[in-house]
Amino acid sequence: MNFKFCNKRISGVLAVVPANERSFVEEMKNYNFPEARSLKLKEVMGYDTHRMVQPNVCVSDLGVFALKNLFNRGLLKPEDIDALILVTQTPDYFMPPTSNVIQGKLNLKQDLLCLDISQGCAGYVIGLIQAFMLLEQDSVRKVVLLNADVLSRRTSPKDRNIYPLIGDAASVTVVERDPQESVIHASFKMDGVRHESLIIPAGGFKLPSTPDTAILVDVGDNNMRGQDHLCMDGSAVFNFVQVEVPQIIETVLASANATMDSVDWFLCHQPNRFMLEKLADKMKVPRSKMPSNVVGRFGNSGATTLPIAMAINLTEALKTGTQRACLAGFGVGLTWAAMLMQIGKLDFCDLIDYP
Amino acid sequence: MNEFLVKLAGILEAEAVKDADDLKAFPQWDSLAVLSVIAMLDSDYGVNLHASDFQQVTTAADLWNLVQSKKRS
């Protein structure tokens, strides 16, 4: 499906990562694999360090911290926020929405639309689509898109398939009307038939968490995980990305009448370096135009990897000028989405630590 | 097929892989090797295999035949 938005822009991006840094090499002893093979995995996938919250840190904690930072630095006024969209797979509660919890903790005004969206690695593009739609309303002048996840809390530390790449993070993206004329194109697709490719089987109403669902089991691949834990069919996800993502990017470029060469940056969700390098090669995009350095430093925190990629690679370029960027997110659902837009000049584009 | 065997040997960190060799007998045959093979087949042969496809594969020749049949379909 293709969407088009006129005269909207991102005005600032702030990424927040936990200060608690873990290292792949230290965690290797938890895995049921020969050390040499784990080191090979590290080399191929580009794993090294990742950031994880301390136990009990919630999405609302990260979100409140991020917004307070912007308030304190005078980069955002609480009273200017007309909508707060939270995209997360790890909410504080089933009810109420975590966006309302954050509204309450920050004493934001009541003339505010709080909206939780359940999306994962495509959640940056999906969140932006929702933000742009809200800006069609006269009464909505500024939208805060908050992406946050604490997936480490639902990942088995004995699962080498997923634990080394997982990270926690939050990001705030301020979205508003563009005083200049501009057009943003978006394309996305969803496939619920493949919803089990990325899943936390237990903990919802279908299969409530019990002592049994917490038990770590080896399902035949030397990895230990419970049904409470994130489970990824790695090769299915790899094929999904290599097949679908180039096509959705082609679609969004075609709808904008844009060529690959006209794009300054391909800013993708960051599953791991290996997958992104294969993706760049397949699309015949220079690897230098597709940053892939997030997972090895911070881990894969879901939707927030995309703003983190901006904050660690493009801060100066986006604060001083404009870049034509093709964003792409892909993951749980399955969902895949791309967006072509001009980004910059941004008022802020930073990465900070959550203590 | 020679080129294919050389690529397999690279992934399995073996000196050589012959068409009758049992892939699962290589010490380096694990989930990472499977993913590396899947990626190689995608980029070099335009074939997308799933990890479960490897259940019907024993030898390097089996894998080659599977790739050829997927290419035709």
Image (tube, helix red, strand yellow):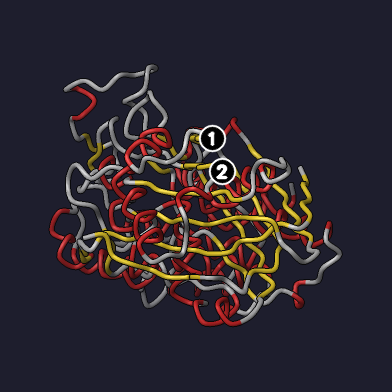
Quadrant showing the N terminus of chain A: top right
- Which residue bears the numbered disc 2? A82
Instruction: Write the residue at 39% across / 17% down.
Output: A206
Residue type beneath disc 2: Asp
Q: Helix, strand or loop at disc 2?
A: loop
Query: What x and y, as percent, mark residue A317?
Result: 57, 81
Query: What x and y, as percent, mark residue B2?
Result: 57, 73
Instruction: Write the residue at 58% across / 66% down.
Output: A267
- Which residue bears the numbered disc 1? A111
Q: Helix, strand or loop at disc 1?
A: loop
* Residue B48 versus residue B6 in the image, above or below: above
* Residue A179 versus residue B15 in the image, above or below: above
Work out whether residue A344 or residue B21 is closer to the camera in this orientation and state it: A344
Instruction: Write the residue at 60% across / 46% down.
Output: A126
Residue A336 left/right relative to A217: right
Q: Tell me which chain the residue with mark 2 is part of.
A: A
Q: Tell me which chain the residue with mark 1 is part of.
A: A
Q: Pointer 1: residues within 10 angstroms few (<14), some, or many (20+)?
A: few
Do tag 2 and tag 1 residues touch (Cβ < 8 Å)?
yes
Query: What x and y, as percent, mark residue A265?
Result: 63, 73
Instruction: Write the residue at 32% across / 61% down.
Output: A17
Quadrant showing the C terminus of chain A: bottom left
Q: Quadrant of residue B16?
A: bottom left
Work out whether residue A8 or residue B32 is closer to the camera in this orientation and state it: A8
* Residue A265 versus residue A243 in the image, above or below: below
Residue type beneath disc 1: Asp
Work out whether residue B11 or residue A334 is closer to the camera in this orientation and state it: A334
Closer to the chain start, of discs 2 and 1, is 2
Query: What x and y, as percent, mark residue A51?
Result: 27, 60
